[in-house]
Amino acid sequence: MPKDIKVLVCGAAGKMGQAVVRAVDSEAGFKLAGAVDRVGNPNIGKDIGLLCGINEIGVKLSGDLKETISKSQADVMVDFTMPEIVIVNAQMALKAGICTVIGTTGMTKSDIAELSKLSKQNSTGAIVAPNFAIGAVLMMKFAKEASKYFASAEIIEYHHDKKLDAPSGTAIKSAELMVENRKLFGRDTVSGKETIKGARGAIGDGNIHIHSVRLPGLIAHQEIILGGTGQTINIRHDAYDRTAFMPGVLMAVKKVMELDCLVYGLENII
Ligand code: NAP
């Protein structure tokens, strides 16, 4: 019988981290090996299963990633923390030869390039995905395809009001994929000036305007609207619950063990 994949979750006390702990605990073939969060978290030392609303699972929340890496013998680290610290966590894991799955958004292109180099140097797999929901990956694929036929496009992304980064990693990644099929969008058709600064949103890759909505009640949603002569096409994805991301996370945990370099985007592994 194949051995369970041992998973260390970084950011385990956070919203996504808790969902990953529950998913790992409930899925055959995976075993939770470690759970880490910020050193000052009041739940350090408590059983992570109880914190996540499931049974006691015998893994205590730790505030020390280095120690957990050496004690847990994890195969894969999954990181859902914050843009300022994910790079340090990932460097620590990759240097220790632990495959790394990153869901944290807000990393710069140079952060990703740096991790890519480290992953190659250590022949240790890494997957960075701004969106683990399969539906969101399909939305991006469909938008890339539609970009061949529509010369104008804008993105509206909607997230909960606690989200730290704007625009979302998914919006940035969507624009990056769309410019693979069309270098420049909308340049000839848009006129008029902004009478309130920012009204036209941020300008992403390929002159694709990106609008970030932040409201309580939302989870993660995005529309990509493409416009042509006398018609528009609207491609929309809604994640109503964080469980939407879990099949993609577990798929990445399995896949990353076969890699010896960094892969950016879930679309490259499904
Ligand atoms: P969250 O609830 O704030 O969780 C982040 C957790 O990381 C918190 O518990 C935070 O602790 C902890 N943390 C902070 N510093 C740490 C450190 N040095 N070491 C370990 N843990 C540390 O946020 P979330 O909603 O779960 O989102 C986490 C990230 O995932 C965000 O970047 C978000 O955009 C991204 N995300 C990605 C996807 C995807 O599919 N890729 C989907 C949803 C969200 P404190 O609360 O004490 O600061």
Image: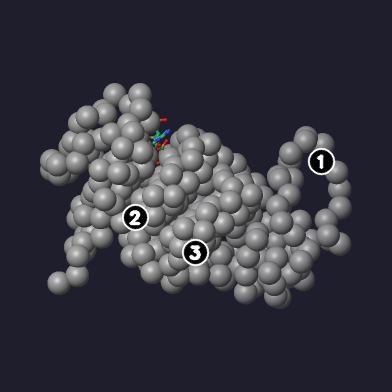
Q: Residue at x 85, y 43 (%)?
A: 193
The x, y position of residue 177, in whole percent, is 63, 65
Residue 263 badge = none
Residue type, mark 1 in image: Glu
Kindly report which numbered mark, 1 or 2, lies closer to the viewer in this rendering.
2
Q: CA distance from mark 1 to mark 2?
A: 47 Å
The answer to whether residue 168 of the structure is visible from this angle is: no
Graded by Cα atoms within 10 Å as few (under 14), some (14 to 19) or many (20 or more), the crowding at tag 2 reads: many
Most foreground residue, 110 or 230: 110
Number of residue marks: 3
Graded by Cα atoms within 10 Å as few (under 14), some (14 to 19) or many (20 or more), the crowding at tag 1 reads: few
Tag 1 secondary structure: loop
N-terminal of the pair, mark 1 or mark 2, is: 2
Residue type, mark 3 in image: Cys
Q: Residue at x 77, y 63 (%)?
A: 185
Graded by Cα atoms within 10 Å as few (under 14), some (14 to 19) or many (20 or more), the crowding at tag 3 reads: many
Task: Return the residue at label 1.
Answer: 194
Task: Return the residue at label 2.
Answer: 76
Q: Residue at x 36, y 38 (%)?
A: 66
The x, y position of residue 213, in whole percent, is 58, 42
The answer to whether residue 115 of the structure is visible from this angle is: yes
